[in-house]
Amino acid sequence: MVQDLLRCRSEPNVLQGYPMIPGNKDKRDGILFSLPYLAVFTLFMIYPLLFGFFISFFKWDILSTAKFVGLKNYTDLFKDAKFYSSLWHTLQFVLITTPILLMMGFAMALAVTGKSPLKGVMETVFFVPYIFSMTVVATLWAWLMQKDFGIFNQVLVSMGAGRVSWLTNEKYAMWSVSLATFWWTAGFNMVLFSAGIKQIPQEIYESAHMDGARPWQVLTHITIPLISSTTVLCLILQVIASFNVFGQVYVMTGGGPSGSTRVLIQYIYETGFRYYKMGYSAAMSYVLFFIILLVSVVQYLTLGRKKD
Amino acid sequence: MKKKLTLALVLLLATGMLFAQGAQEQGAQPSGPIELTFWSLFTGGDGEFFDAMIKEFNASQNEIVMRNDMVKFDNYYTKLTTALSAKTAPDVVVVHQGNLLNYVPSGSLLPLDGYVDKSMLEDFQEAPLEACRFDGKLYSLPFDVHPIVMYYNKDILKAAGITTIPSTAEEFTKAAKQVKDKTGKWGMAIDNTTGTYKAYTLTRLFMSMMAQQGGSLLSDDTKKANFNNAYGEKALTWLKDLVNKDKVNPNELDYDAAMNMFKLGDAAFYFNGVWATGTLENVEGLNFGAAPLPAFMGKSAAWAGSHTLAIPVQKNQDPKKVAAAIKFIDWMTSHGELWAKAGHIPTRKSVTRKAEYKALPYRADYGAAAAFALPTPRTAAWEEIYGTMSDMLEKAVTKNQDTKSALSEMEKTINAIIATY
């Protein structure tokens, strides 16, 4: 039975609408079953995407009629110092979190697919933070890191050290938010990497062991190369997710101190929903979209397209 | 057969969804109380007092029943804006006075002039009521005024040997230094860093001090910044020096830390809006007083926000509901002593004469502040100006920037912002 299905998969006929089980109209049924989802998807994803692009050529404050301004929103944003500083803050976050989260996820996955008797416990402990909501995590860490009363500084003071301005010094603030993000989301990367590691056939490890390979050699010559497709996937997903950062920064620092951690999405949100400059906000979000798209495509083209 | 049964069950379940909306439609009652809807943005302590007032309103008469829906504060204005644009907003809404300008030009709020009788209008305090007028028309009625006020720790002042409350900026600096020398505690607790809350206090004090010297933050036509001058320099220098030169105010102090510092009895003078009263009076052992914002730099003037009650324009405006809404607003504002329990200042003169109001601790002490409340500058750019000035003042104070260059950079940025509106 399994062999038949496998053969079906590789046979070209199946792709041309040849039913898997003779007599059923799979194509028609498939389309019908997808329709409800597609309807909702079009209404709540496609339409807003197109409308957003459309409104980026207008000046609109939601309540009045929109005024056509052509490319003015785009030319304005390229002259807006706050747009550039917000984009830079987002970029800082991407550069800090991407390598560390990838390495953390990989390290956790190694621990969890290894031989330790604690690996079940570790898997739970590493993953549980991911299921907490952003607000819970960010509020918790904001209080842990609060300069005058937070527990981190209380511990430091009791050990004789001085208070650290985790979130109130612009040199540390983004790192502190990143630290909270590591705790919160590294578990997700761990899941991806452990799935990748588990796909490596045991025979390869066994033969390497018989050849006398040391653990470090196994890691660098077998494990890492064989999960390269997972690594690329993780990298692309992590970069996209980091570019979209907003929640935890907004809750922990409010974009401060003095706006030094205001990320682009916060600026987009404030411009649209606090200052009611909807068209300008839409234009900025499309520029961000194209930046992320460009980065992802470049990553995929240079790293992704290899022998699989 | 099994397949047909399954299909029938699935169809039944699916059609059940069509009735999901039906529950909201209650049978129209031709004779019975008029039902009004209201969106409240009051959460926490404020929310409890407000809900209690609505309960009492509903219990006090049987013509009108008010249904109160609380919206989380962060989402309130987004929800309100979308509802107003679709003309599906409730019958009465709360709008901060500073946000009215976002809704008035589009005709989303009903002008109330024809609906409110003269005796009710005359009972309102002048300044808050005028703040609700645009182009001569009245678009909402003020429910409260919540200015920034001063709280002071009586025990610390006694221990430091301070017998009179200072009034000028120089006197405050001197008193704060005395507190530090004699008791080791902080003299002032003005928050100057954005933590979970934005550092608005600096802007509020800066604005107030501009007005106290006879100036204003923006020009009269609100088209240009008006603070890059001697007034602005005096105000910013004082705020900066408290932290950096005199060292009587902690640096990198955020809103929560400032509040907690005062609650723990570690600071002598604390400046925040009247909403803090409720929290402070629940702290055991905190012996404090409250007073209107001192006239640091000459005249009396204090930044104030104001909650106002407005009636949205509906697709089919029901005159009975409008009349009922006005009755509701009348009742709520004339029972302002109940709202004052949350710390806010009522807006009706009749309320300030009531014995129950006068008996409330602290609130009666700063009730006079309503008279010199500073209205928000009338420009659609205000929200962006307010936020940006907070960021820049935060930087100037915490980094001890040179006053003149900090002010001129602020002026340039604010003027650029105004130009985009």
Image (cartoon, coloured by chain):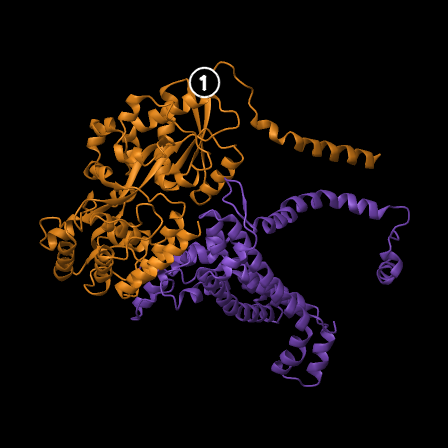
Pick the quarter of the image with the N terminus of chain B.
top right
Residue in view at x 87 percent, y 51 percent = A19
Subunit of mark 1?
B
- Given residues B148 and B128, the one toward you in this image is B128
**Vertical arrangement, residue B178 with respect to residue B344, above or below:** below
- Residue B85 horizontal side relative to residue B304, left or right: right
Residue B330 rendering spot, x and y as whole percentages: 34, 25
Residue A282 rendering spot, x and y as whole percentages: 55, 52
Question: For the view shown, which residue lies furthest in the bottom direction?
Answer: A212
- Given residues A261 and A192, the one toward you in this image is A261
Q: Residues within 10 Å of mark 1 (few under 14, many from 20)?
A: some
Chain letter of the orange region = B
The residue at which mark 1 appears reads as: B33
Evaluate whether residue A296 shows in this view: yes
Residue in view at x 11 percent, y 55 percent = B160
Residue A172 image-quadrant placement: bottom left
Evaluate whether residue A284 shows in this view: no
- Residue A98 horizontal side relative to residue A47, left or right: left
Say which colour chain A has: purple
Question: For the view shown, which residue lies furthest in the top direction?
Answer: B31
**Vertical arrangement, residue B124 with respect to residue A283, above or below:** above
